[in-house]
Image (cartoon, helix red, strand yellow):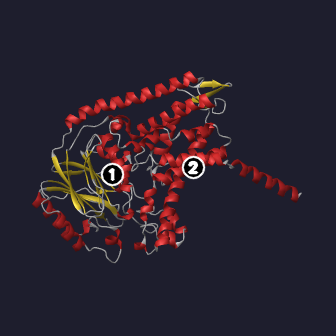
Amino acid sequence: MAEKAKKEKESKFKLLLNGFKLSPGELALAAGGGGLLGLSAPGNPFWILAWVGLIPLLLQIAGGKGRRKTFLLGLIFGTCYNLTALNWYLGLYPLDWLGFNWWQGWLLAGSALTIVSFHQGLLIGLLSLILYMVPLTGGFLPRKVSGKWHLPALIFIPIFWVLFMNKIGNAPGALGVPWSMLEYSQYRQTQLIQCASIIGGIGIGALIVLVNTALAGLYATIKGKSKFKALAAKNKGAAIKDLLISLVLMASIVALGLFESAKVETETKADTDLYMLQGNINIDMQKTSRRYSLTDLFEHYDELLKGVKDGVLVWTESSVPIFLNEHKHVIEELRNLARDRELDMVVGSMHRKIKTRPYNSAYGIGGNGTMVTNVYHKRYLVPFGEYAPAIIDLFPPVVRKLTNTPAGSGFAAGTVPHVLDLPRGKIAPLICFECISPELVVSSTRAGGELLVNVSDLAWFHESSIGEQMIAFSIFRAIENRRYLAFAANTGPSAVIDPRGKVTARSKMSKALVLKGRVKFLKDRTIFSRWFQ
């Protein structure tokens, strides 16, 4: 009996493994398709790939041969997509400032890229599994097949994709970071993405998935209607009609965005000088024995700020690396600078209250020398960078060393979209990768923000593409809210973006400088900022 039970157990295990078995062709299509789609990410010129890059995955889902295999194919596709799109994680190297040698630095940077990519791959794997399990049919209308109703793929897939990837799977509570979303591939196509003020970046992402689904449906109908039932239309003519409807729908929404943006162009001409202090304080100057003192920093800043006056001055994230509210003499020095130069200032620093964890914050100082009473505290913290979940205690010391803060401490998250009410207007601050969150930016606009200012410190990632990708996010946030957006990065690139997503001023990386641009404080609300939650 024991021998029989053992054989039955081995047989079940073999069946389980067979459920995950892939042919070389299936593996190559999933891995290659994901990697190719990753080339559409910001920083690469292949934006057009986003409009066709999902076709291999959609066909593999529709022609799936079991739940396990479908999940695995989605996992491989998603992981390879993110390995390509998020290659800036390799910019963490070198990590000698943390005490790691060259090979340890490469290993840890590569591990960070792999772990994050695998996490995002798991989401796409789960998404693929759900799409496989839901009864779907080609077209825009539900259809009864073999006595059972099937949902229309051209409606369900685009909507479910963006809800799952942009909202549910990448929610902050799930340690999610919605970085590699499809819509950002289009950040240079400013005419195409003007409709973001109506449907948002999330809506543009849905349009991208819609076109991919329609093209996959046409292929499925022509090449293998019986094999790809979840995507195939009734016939070739119906599939072509579905594709044309998809393209017309997309063109109509794009045209509506262009019509709305024409009015914006005439009403939002810049009238205020804005300066961004790009100190270029690299990681060695921050974290090693060669660390700059506060005196060193202010001498450096004074040299850069010669001739800067009359406008808005933005200091980058943690450019004043102290708990500013505890240093009255530094506050007084900043107030004098603001008053003497007639500068409304946003200053990146830290804030600490009694019996609470500290905050990563942005302070406001008016050109009349007054300090804004409310302080903006960063609401969206970097997992394992600005805070470490208690689970980190279960990991070995070498892993805990990689977190910027010990478990149970680190920064506290802000909860209020504080706006800095300055003499020239109301500034809505954002810190670091908060530009990735349309929810946070919309809440800041609703709170009265007339100018968006994102302060950041990207020194950790050296000269990688992370800055370019954050500018891509900022372009979408500017259009969604029809606000000027100043993206100020310590080591660059910094940029001024107008309400139509045009970069009107931009700096190079790894240069100490003051970038000057022109902005305007705006009050009107967009359709997107009214409905999006």
Residue type at mark 2: give it.
Ala
Which residue sits at x=31%, y=74%? 291
- Residue 401 in picture, x, y percent from top left: 47, 71
Residue 450 figure quarter = top left
- Could you tell me which quadrant the N terminus lies in? bottom right
In the drawing, what numbered circle is on residue 23? none
> Residue 316, position in %: x, y?
27, 60
Q: Nearer the viewer, residue 306 or 455?
A: 306
What residue sits right under mark 1 in the picture? Answer: 416
Q: Answer with left or right where residue 252 lies relative to residue 280.
A: right
Taking the spot 48% from the left edge, 41% from the top edge, the residue there is 163
Which residue is labeled 2 in the image? 31
In this image, 413 relative to 398: left or right? left
Is any atom of residue 107 visible in this view?
Answer: yes
In front: mark 1 or mark 2? 2
Could you classify mark 2 by the number of other residues whose Cα lies within 10 Å: few (under 14), some (14-19), or many (20 or more)?
Answer: many
Q: Residue furthest left?
A: 340
Q: Which tag, 1 or 2, sits closer to the chain's start?
A: 2
Viewer-side residue, 385 vs 82: 82
The outermost residue toward the bottom is 289
Q: How crowded is mark 1: few (under 14 residues within 10 Å), some or many (20 or more)?
A: some
Q: Position of residue 456 (x, y in %)?
A: 32, 58
In the current view of this chain or complex, which residue is farthest to the right? 1
Check the image and report above or below for 236 versus 379: above
Quarter of the figure with the C terminus:
top left
Could you tell me the amino acid type at mark 1?
Val
